[in-house]
Image (spheres, rainbow, N blue to C red):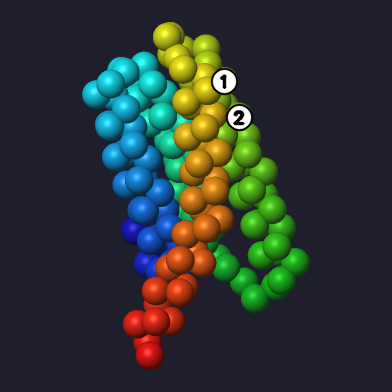
Amino acid sequence: MALNKAPVWLIKTLNIQVIVLTIIGVGLFITSAVTGYSVLLGGAIYSLPTYWAMRREFNRSNASNDPKRTLAQMYGNEILKFGFTILLFVAAFKLVQPLNSLALLLAYIGSYVLAALLPVVIAKQTSVNRK
């Protein structure tokens, strides 16, 4: 797997996101199956394209030192990730019935917030452990 080139905090962030949303989704599944799998789908809609883009980014064997090419590849990855996310949203809303739309969207937004906050928490833990 090419993710061994990825920074540790990036892999930890994705793993923690998946674990947190899985726990929340399974917990909600006990009370309401529709809400539970809607949360799991919302988390998957965020996590799958992110994981795919991360693998693609760190799997480039022909990585050059040309900053323009690297930047173009990174932007290309983000555009493909965005398209993959839209495709997953469309598939979820078209194919999954019944669906709790609010739970799905809140799980997606929650994943996004976790992705923004977890690197800060991980960096603080890492800096505390170094002292």
Q: Amino acid at mark 1?
A: Val
Image spot of residue 56 (x, y percent):
50, 53
Q: Tell whether 33 sits left or right of 58.
A: left
Specify whether 81 is left or right of 67.
left
* Quarter-of-image position of residue 82: top right
Query: Measuring 27% from the left and 31% from the top, which residue is drawn there?
Result: 26
- Residue 41 in view, yes or no: no
Q: Quadrant of residue 25?
A: top left
- Work out whether 22 lies above or below 68: above
Q: Quadrant of the C terminus?
A: bottom left
Q: Mark 2 packing: few (<14 Cα in 10 Å), some, or many (20+)?
A: some
Task: Tell me the crowding category of disc 1: few under 14, some 14 to 19, or many 20 or more residues within 10 angstroms, Cα based.
Answer: few
What residue is shown with label 2? 86
Instruction: Give the number of the disc on residue 20.
Output: none
Element carrying mark 1: helix
Query: Quick one: 27 or 69, which is closer to the camera?
Result: 27
**Residues at marks 2 and 1 touching, judged by CB atoms closer than 8 Å:** yes
In this rendering, does residue 74 appear at all? yes
| Cα distance between the residues tagged 2 and 1 | 6 Å
Residue holding disc 1 = 90
